[in-house]
Image (spheres, rainbow, N blue to C red):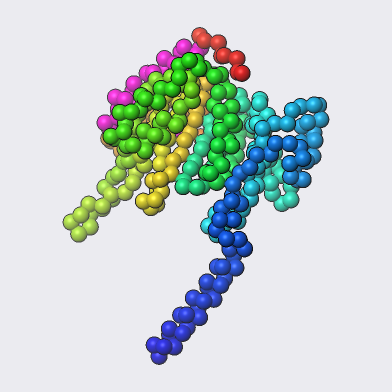
């Protein structure tokens, strides 16, 4: 009887494994990984046929070929991505999203972008642009790619981040050493903070918030807790409000990832603080046409949070008196 049960289990397992394998792409792991890499498109001849008409119209007046990156579609077992063509048109970012043999164009004028989000978890990366499209519609568009090729998007991210305030004071150099004191608190977030800055950024204020856990229940005399907020930080510069956080992780491995939000100061309509659950505070970044960006802080951060609000208020007041620099 036991042998019959074992035979049935082996048969069911064999059929299930065959069904799963049938869903996998017919390439080895290395080829599948390379298939997720983004790649540059540097000439009209290199543009995939599906987008030729768009580029024919774009270049008809003698316009130079724009900086363009292709994020390919790839069908992994647990990961799906759709092909996109991302173009830096200098005054706007255009994302051509492929679907059903055609494509849909999402065009975001630089002045209409409320924030840009970058997300990295191991080799999986994505970028989201949120704001108002060329048609005046509030929207957000995301695209995924392998983190090995994230350097291809550096010029595009830089274009967006510098759009509202220009290149700043290049002679200022990097102020990344301001985060050296964080090495003993959280070495990973010290490095996250350093890589978040652009040359010429002036760091005005920064807050590092360790993960927040709350008591969930008592079990066998032990207190079990739940994650209320992952480790995160907020950096106020003279150009942006930058927030960085870990994933709201479901497993220990999720803490290797990071999510960056870059918010131009000129897009923030209000920066507010509200008390939550008695001893916690919620910081809300209010933006036009998109939902507020919110983050949770412990009671010990109250003084630093109020200082952040004060410093932001000073920058906002000065911006009303300072002309916007010309973008180069």
Q: Residue furthest right?
A: 60
Determine whether 325 is above or below 284 in the image.
above
Please provide percent x and percent y for residue 281. Answer: 33, 33
Residue range highlighted in magenta? 293-320
Q: Nearer the viewer, residue 34 or 134?
A: 34
Indicate the quadrant containing the C terminus: top left, top right, bottom left or bottom right: top right
Q: Is residue 202 magenta?
A: no
Please provide percent x and percent y for residue 154. Answer: 56, 33
> Residue at 57% of width from left, 45% of height from top?
145
- Looking at the magenta stretch, what is its main secondary structure? helix
Q: Nearer the viewer, residue 150 or 107?
A: 150
> Residue at 48% of width from left, 23% of height from top?
199
For the question of whether residue 16 can be seen, the reply is yes
Q: Is residue 309 magenta?
A: yes
Please provide percent x and percent y for residue 15. Answer: 54, 76
Determine whether 266 is above or below 21 in the image.
above
């Amino acid at each position: 009887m036991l042998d019959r049960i074992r035979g049935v289990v082996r048969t069911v397992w064999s059929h299930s494994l065959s069904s799963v394998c049938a869903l996998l792409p017919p390439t080895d792991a290395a080829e599948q990984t390379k298939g997720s890499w983004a790649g540059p498109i540097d000439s009209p001849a290199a543009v995939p046929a599906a987008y030729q008409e768009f580029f024919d119209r774009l270049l008809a007046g003698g316009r130079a070929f724009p900086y363009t990156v292709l994020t390919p579609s790839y069908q992994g077992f647990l990961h799906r991505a759709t092909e996109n063509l991302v173009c830096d048109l200098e005054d706007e970012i255009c994302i051509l999203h492929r679907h059903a043999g055609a494509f849909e164009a999402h065009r975001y004028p630089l002045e209409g972008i409320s924030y840009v989000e970058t997300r990295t978890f191991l080799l999986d990366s994505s970028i989201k642009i949120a704001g108002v499209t060329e048609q005046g519609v509030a929207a957000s568009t995301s695209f995924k790619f392998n983190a090995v090729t994230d350097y291809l998007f550096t010029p595009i991210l830089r274009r967006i981040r510098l759009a509202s305030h220009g290149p700043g004071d290049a002679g200022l150099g990097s102020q990344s050493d301001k985060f050296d004191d964080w090495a003993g608190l959280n070495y990973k977030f010290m490095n996250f903070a350093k890589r978040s800055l652009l040359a010429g950024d002036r760091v005005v204020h920064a807050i590092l918030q360790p993960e927040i856990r709350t008591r969930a229940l008592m079990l066998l005399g032990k207190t079990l807790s739940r994650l209320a907020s992952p480790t995160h930080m907020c950096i106020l510069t003279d150009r942006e409000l930058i927030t960085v956080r870990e994933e709201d992780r479901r497993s220990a491995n999720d803490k290797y990832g990071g999510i960056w939000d870059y918010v131009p100061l000129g897009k923030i309509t209000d920066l507010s603080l509200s008390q939550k659950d008695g001893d916690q505070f919620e910081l809300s970044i209010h933006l036009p046409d998109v939902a507020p960006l919110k983050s949770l802080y412990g009671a010990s951060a109250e003084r630093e949070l109020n200082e952040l609000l004060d410093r932001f208020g000073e920058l906002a007041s000065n911006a009303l008196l300072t002309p916007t620099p010309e973008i180069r």
